[in-house]
Image (cartoon, coloured by chain):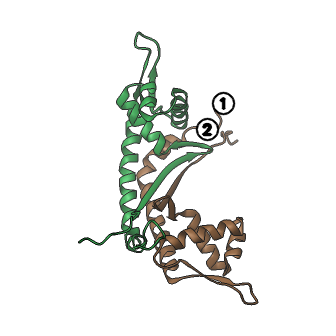
Chain colours: A green, B brown
Amino acid sequence: MAEERPLMHHPEIQCRVRVARGIDIAVGPGKMELLEAIRDAGSISGGARRMGMSYRRAWMLVETMNSCFAQPLVATSTGGRAGGGAKVTAQGEDVLRIYTAMMADVEAVAQRHLQPLLPSLLSKPAETAGS
Amino acid sequence: MAEERPLMHHPEIQCRVRVARGIDIAVGPGKMELLEAIRDAGSISGGARRMGMSYRRAWMLVETMNSCFAQPLVATSTGGRAGGGAKVTAQGEDVLRIYTAMMADVEAVAQRHLQPLLPSLLSKPAETAGS
C-alpha cells in the first residue's frame, strides 16, 4: 500500500522585469498582458474586459505606455458606428515580441541557477505537522 | 553656448526574482539583502538596524526563510553576555552566492534583450512641456 505523503508546496520561481522611466512603468508584466489583450480584442474596452479591469484603468495604462515611448504602442480610432477601436502598432508589436523573448530567457537563466536549491526547498511539507 | 536640454528620466530596467513556496517567499530580494546584513552585523538585531526595519520584522523574515529550507539559513545563539548572535549558515551562504550570481545573469539577459527599446524610451523628456 502506498505510504501517506504530506501535502507538498512545490517551490515556484517568479520573475518580474519592468522598465521604469521616472515614476512611470513603461514596460511590465501587467502592461504587456494588457497589450496582448488589446491586440486580441481589437479595442481597449475589450482588452480591459479580458483582463477583468475597468476601462478607465486600461485606458490609463495605455496612456502611460504611449507617453513613455516616442511612438505609441496602441493607436486608437475614435467615433464611427463601432464606437472606435484600438490597434497595437508596429512599435507595440516590437515591444511585445522583445518582452516575451526576454522573459523566456530570464526564466530559463533563473531556473538554471536556482535548480540546485530546489531539492532543499522541496524537502519540507506544507504543514508543519509531521507526516 | 550649450543648448538647454529638457530634464530626461533615463529608463531603468528593474528585475526581481523570488522563490515562493505556497504563500511563503523563501528567497527574494528583501530576504537576501537581510541575509547579507545579518552576516555583516553578526546578529538579527544588527541586520535589522542596517536595513531600517524592526527586529520583529527581521526575525519573522528569518523564521520564514528558515522554515522553507531543510537546513536553516540563519543560526541563532541565545543568551550569553552579548545577548545572543546570529550566523549565516553554510546553506545560507550557498543561497546568497547562488542568488547573487543568478541576479547578475538575469540582469545581463534583460539588458541585452531590452537594449533595442531604450532609445525610443530615452527620446522623450520627463516633462510633457516641449523642450
Of all chains, the one bearing label 2 is B
Residue A66 higher or lower than B49, as above or below: above
Farthest residue to the top: give it: A81
Pinpoint residue A58: horizontal percent, then vertical percent.
51, 31
Q: Position of residue A28 (x, y in %)?
A: 49, 45
**In the picture provided, is A78 more to the left or to the right than B36?**
left
Look at the numbered disc 1 and give the secondary structure of its residue.
Answer: loop
Q: Counting other residues with Cα less than 10 Å from the Cα at mark 1, is it few (<14), some (14-19), or many (20 or more)?
A: few
User: Where does the image place residue B46, in percent across and percent down from the top left?
Assistant: 71, 75
Question: Residue tagged by mark 2?
Answer: B125
The quarter of the displayed image where residue A37 is located: top left
Q: Is residue B121 positioned above or below A131 on the image?
A: above
- View extreme (right): residue: B81
Disc 2 crowd rating (10 Å Cα; few below 14, some 14-19, many 20+) is: some
User: As shown in the figure, which amino acid type bears the numbered disc 1?
Assistant: Ala
Which residue is drawn at the image coordinates 34% and 69% (left, top)? A5
**Quick one: B96 or A75, which is closer to the camera?**
B96
Looking at the image, which residue is at 45% across and 25% down? Answer: A45
* Farthest residue, direction front: A1
Marks 1 and 2: CB-CB under 8 Å? Answer: yes
Percent coordinates x, y for residue A44 in the rendering? 45, 27
Q: Which residue lies furthest to the left in this view?
A: A1
Task: Choose top left, top right, bottom left or bottom right for residue A112.
Answer: bottom left
Q: Residue at x 68, y 79 (%)?
A: B41
Q: Which amino acid does label 2 sit on?
A: Pro
Is the N terminus of chain B in the top left, top right, bottom left or bottom right quadrant? top right
**Nearer to me, A48 or B62:** B62
Q: Name the residue under label 1.
A: B129
